[in-house]
Image (tube, rainbow, N blue to C red):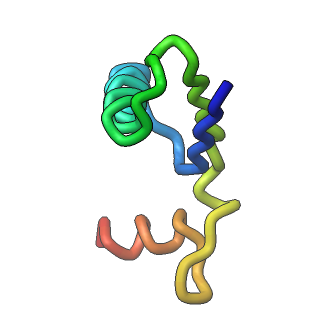
Amino acid sequence: MPVITVDLHSIDTEQKKALIENLTKTAVEVTNIPAEKFTILINELDSTNIGIGGQTLAELKAAQAR
């Protein structure tokens, strides 16, 4: 049973649904493994737990909002 794991910032339920559908569709096209065999795991990370270029994602978002 193939497992696809995605780590990202928090997203809403509709975005999760679209992500799961699209990841599954692409994986099926590439591997020819039936969709029902795939498990998709979404790990949501708080934006203070993601660092880019020495800053947290929360800091980067705050700077963009200014």
- x then y, percent, for residue 52: 54, 79
> Which residue lies most toward the front here?
32
The answer to whether residue 15 is seen in the rendering is: no
> Which residue lies most toward the bottom here?
54
Q: Is residue 8 above or below residue 10?
A: below
Q: Quadrant of the image for the C terminus?
A: bottom left
- x then y, percent, for residue 19: 38, 33
- x then y, percent, for residue 14: 34, 21
Q: Residue at x 47, y 26 (%)?
A: 33
The answer to whether residue 25 is seen in the rendering is: yes
Q: In the depicted view, which residue is nearer to us: 40 or 37? A: 37
Tell me where residue 13 sits by quadrant: top left
Q: Is residue 50 above or below residue 34?
A: below
Q: Is residue 7 above or below residue 3?
A: below
- x then y, percent, for residue 1: 67, 24
Q: Residue at x 31, y 66 (%)?
A: 65
